[in-house]
């Protein structure tokens, strides 16, 4: 059942007219995670416990704020702040004397308080929630490629991938595929990535040309939205 559930968003993303199906999948997961976090779930003890422990990265905190549930976000942030202060108070009392610099260790290195702060600075409840399901989507892509001719055809006809997600697929292929099938997959995504990066690059070139008075009366062709499409190809920005 789970396998079938995961194939639906993967197939939907590859059916969509977009520059990177994996970006589309990740964006959908991110939107769902924001909705879930700002919905009734934030009142549940287990969810509040996770958000209090992990907090949020800058990007996702900004998206949570834009959701407009200011009361919900205030409650979540207060719980996170209360836990952070409690943990730091405990660590600062038990970590002993302030570490000093030595020939082999920088000042502050090994301090439990700074280690804790580095840990929460790199953690995010939304990122974790998104990445957990996204990893399953990646596995599903390879599963469908292995068993379905229709999906292989669909992949060949897509508009390629952003650089980041091309790298994800390229690096993951040996984990899920082997032998000639793996080589075929790599050759296909190489062609998809390179051909479509060149396509968008050519659109960007024409977009640039349109700022030259000599091209003022020329048609835009496919260049009007070349810049946002280029941003997606290079930096996964939808």
Image: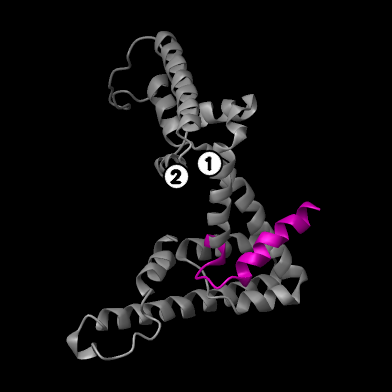
Percent position of residue 79, x then y: 49, 22
> Can you identify the residue that label 2 sits on?
63
Tell me if residue 92 is in the magenta stretch: no
Q: CA distance from mark 1 to mark 2?
A: 10 Å
Q: Earlier in the sequence, mark 1 or mark 2?
A: 2
Q: Quadrant of the C terminus?
A: bottom left
Callout 1: few (<14), some (14-19), or many (20+) C-alpha neighbours within 10 Å?
many
Q: Which mark is residue 126?
A: 1
**Label 2 element class:** helix
Q: Is the residue 135 above or below the residue 180 in the image? A: above
Please state if 135 lies on the left or on the right of 69 as rendered. right
Q: Residue at x 30, y 27 (%)?
A: 106
Tell me if residue 7 is in the magenta stretch: yes
**Label 1 element class:** helix
Q: Which mark is residue 82?
A: none
Q: Is the residue 238 above or below the residue 155 in the image? A: above
- Which residue occupies the extreme right position in the image? 1
**Toward which corner of the image does residue 152 lie, by quadrant?**
bottom right
Percent position of residue 142, x then y: 68, 64
- Which portion, as a residue range, is magenta? 1-23
Q: Are marks 1 and 2 in contact (CB under 8 Å)?
A: yes
Please state if 213 lies on the left or on the right of 101 as rendered. left
Percent position of residue 235, x then y: 40, 61
Q: Residue at x 57, y 63 (%)?
A: 169
């Amino acid at each position: 059942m789970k396998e079938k559930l995961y194939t639906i968003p993967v197939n939907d993303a590859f059916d969509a007219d977009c520059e990177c199906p994996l970006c589309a999948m990740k964006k959908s997961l991110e939107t769902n995670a924001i909705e879930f976090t700002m919905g009734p779930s934030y009142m549940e003890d287990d969810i509040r416990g996770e958000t209090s422990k992990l907090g949020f990265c800058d990007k996702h905190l900004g998206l949570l704020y834009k959701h407009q549930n200011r009361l919900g976000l205030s409650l979540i942030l207060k719980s996170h702040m209360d836990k952070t202060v409690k943990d730091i108070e405990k660590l600062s009392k038990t970590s002993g004397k302030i570490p000093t610099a030595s020939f082999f260790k920088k000042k502050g290195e090994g301090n439990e308080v700074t280690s804790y702060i580095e840990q929460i600075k790199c953690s995010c409840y939304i990122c974790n929630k998104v990445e957990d399901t996204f990893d399953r989507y990646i596995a599903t892509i390879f599963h469908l490629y292995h068993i379905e001719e229709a999906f292989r055809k669909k992949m060949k006809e897509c508009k390629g991938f952003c650089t980041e997600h091309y790298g994800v697929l390229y690096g993951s292929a040996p984990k899920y595929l082997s032998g000639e099938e793996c080589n075929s997959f790599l050759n296909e995504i190489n062609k998809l990535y390179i051909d479509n990066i060149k396509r968008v690059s050519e659109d960007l070139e024409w977009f640039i040309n349109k700022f030259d008075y000599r091209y003022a009366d020329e048609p835009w062709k496919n260049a009007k939205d070349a810049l946002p499409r280029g941003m997606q190809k290079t930096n996964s920005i939808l």
